[in-house]
């Protein structure tokens, strides 16, 4: 007997037998429900290549790109003039990430418990619950029984800070702390458009670490492409106005720790059974405890204290109300122009003061922390579902978009050296990814060619036999 499997709107799968037990006849359901069910039935024939894993990978790539761009631009805005403390900013982002994870996990856990303890409804009510109207769906989204709230328990499962597990994730956390700290320090000294040039040595360190640790050989073409990337880094470093020496050094060190971090992600995921969210949570908890000693050792704590005290003492000089009143009593036109200019200065300062106030800085830090949370989560998804090569290719695409936005939106300086460095690093990275993909395909085809043999004679066939 052939059983038809249909996909429900809440993501579950139900057979035709269970659907018949829940709703006796499709005639009892409204026409909108039947049309929706028909659309779901025609979905697989129209898109046969789209699998749940493919959909998850595409979603993870989109989330990673958006979160990465948001993190870079928010950090650049904060580090440029509002909050020039990269290590403190990194620590606050981890604290915000831990708090956001716990909040989303609590909402998802409450949603799941509310859904499981819901009383049994009749068949017609369950049929309507599976196919709610658009208004009802939007209303239920804000409640604990909504599909959106219930999915939070899947993406942010409840975890507890186990000391043994924290110790097992500690090597990954050390590489992560160094990577994020040097990365934000680099972003403080460079432009957004040349940030990719400063971080381009990740390819070189990845290639070296894969050869030393994983014993993975790299072809000559890939090595030459990596040389083009290094040449772009050197050319971009010649222009101190767009890429300073401090930015180049911190970017190179950050690239080294990013290569170590990428290698340890897959190893840590394998040790913990592939639990992406759990590894991310333990990593953020470790980072929240590792950053404060670094802030104290580097002297950033004292600089932070002086910064806030100097901001409190050195306020912008503004005309007082008494001066404005005395000037308004004079009927001469110069005085009137002075009053108008003073009022305009007050309005302009109030506008600037809000976007430089501690409240606005706090909002930007919270937003960057949430973006960093989804950036870390999506990076675990991509590496766990695909491969580090796919993760690197996505990083290059994001770098192209980021460079264009830096030149167009922020109107940053585009010197010939900076443009040459950007073009060399991006072209070398693209060529490196293409050659690495060919190497991976060649490595997959080699065992298949070795196994093709004649079962009667035992001789190798195909390309291997012709050698």
Image (tube, rainbow, N blue to C red):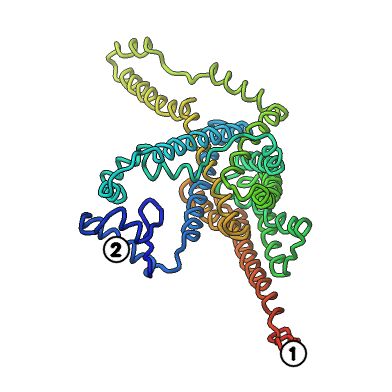
Q: Which residue is mark 2?
A: 38
Q: Is residue 144 left or right of residue 101?
A: left
* Figure disc tally: 2
The image shows residue 217, relative to residue 418, as above or below, that is: below
Location of residue 314 (image quadrant): top right
**Screen quadrant of the N terminus:** bottom left
Q: Pick whichever of labels 2 and 1 is earlier in the sequence.
A: 2
Q: Secondary structure at mark 2?
A: helix
The image position of residue 337, as x and y in percent, is 32, 22
Q: CA distance from mark 2 to mark 1?
A: 55 Å
Out of 372 and 151, give the one closest to the viewer.
151
Dot 2 and dot 1 residues touching (CB under 8 Å)? no
Q: Nearer the viewer, mark 2 or mark 1?
A: 1
The residue carrying mark 1 is 457
| Direction from residue 228 to residue 140 in the image, left or right | left
Disc 1 crowd rating (10 Å Cα; few below 14, some 14-19, many 20+) is few
Q: Residue 392: where, in percent of width, then height?
A: 61, 57
| Residue 222 horizontal side relative to residue 365, left or right | right
Of 261 and 18, nearer the camera is 18
Q: Is residue 255 visible?
A: no
**In this picture, residue 87 sits left or right of residue 342:** right
Circle 2 residues within 10 Å: few <14, some 14–19, many ≥20: few
């Amino acid at each position: 007997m052939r059983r038809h499997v249909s996909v429900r709107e809440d993501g579950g799968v139900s057979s035709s037998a269970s659907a018949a037990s829940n709703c006796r006849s499709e005639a009892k359901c409204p026409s909108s429900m039947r049309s929706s069910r028909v659309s779901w039935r025609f979905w697989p024939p129209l898109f046969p290549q789209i699998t749940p894993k493919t959909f998850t990978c595409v979603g993870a790539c989109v989330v990673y790109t958006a979160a990465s761009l948001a993190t870079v631009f928010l950090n650049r805005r904060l580090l440029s003039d509002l909050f020039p403390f990269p290590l403190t900013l990194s620590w606050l982002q981890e604290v915000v990430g831990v708090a956001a994870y716990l909040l989303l996990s609590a909402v998802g856990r409450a949603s799941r418990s509310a859904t499981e303890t819901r009383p049994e409804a009749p068949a017609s009510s369950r049929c309507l619950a599976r196919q709610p109207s658009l208004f009802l769906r939007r209303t239920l989204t804000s409640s604990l029984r909504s599909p959106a709230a219930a999915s939070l328990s899947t993406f942010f499962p409840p975890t507890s800070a186990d000391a043994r597990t924290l110790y097992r994730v500690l090597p990954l956390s050390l590489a992560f702390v160094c990577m994020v700290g040097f990365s934000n320090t680099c972003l403080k000294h460079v432009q957004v458009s040349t940030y990719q040039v400063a971080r381009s040595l990740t390819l070189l360190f990845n290639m070296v670490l894969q050869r030393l640790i994983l014993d993975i050989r790299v072809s000559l073409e890939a090595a030459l492409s990596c040389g083009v990337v290094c040449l772009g880094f050197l050319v971009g470093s010649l222009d101190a106005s767009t890429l300073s020496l401090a930015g180049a050094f911190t970017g190179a060190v950050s690239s080294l720790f990013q290569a170590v971090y990428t290698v340890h992600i897959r190893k840590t995921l394998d040790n913990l059974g592939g639990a992406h969210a759990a590894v991310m949570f333990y990593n953020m908890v470790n980072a929240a405890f590792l950053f404060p000693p670094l802030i104290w050792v580097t002297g950033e704590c004292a600089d932070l204290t002086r910064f806030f005290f100097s901001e409190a003492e050195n306020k912008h000089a503004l005309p007082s109300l008494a001066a404005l009143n005395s000037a308004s009593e004079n009927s001469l036109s110069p005085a009137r122009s002075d009053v108008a200019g003073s009022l305009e200065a007050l309005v302009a300062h109030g506008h600037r003061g809000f976007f430089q106030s501690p409240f606005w800085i706090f909002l930007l830090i919270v937003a960057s922390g949430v973006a960093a949370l989804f950036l870390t989560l999506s990076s675990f998804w991509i590496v766990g579902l695909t491969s580090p090569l796919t993760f690197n290719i996505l990083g290059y695409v994001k770098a192209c978009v980021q460079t264009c936005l830096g030149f167009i939106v922020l109107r940053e300086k585009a010197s010939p050296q900076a443009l040459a460095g950007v073009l060399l690093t991006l072209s070398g990275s693209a060529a490196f990814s293409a050659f690495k993909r060919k190497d991976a395909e060649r490595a997959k085809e080699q065992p298949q060619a070795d196994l093709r043999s004649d079962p009667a004679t035992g001789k190798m066939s195909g390309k291997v036999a012709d050698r």
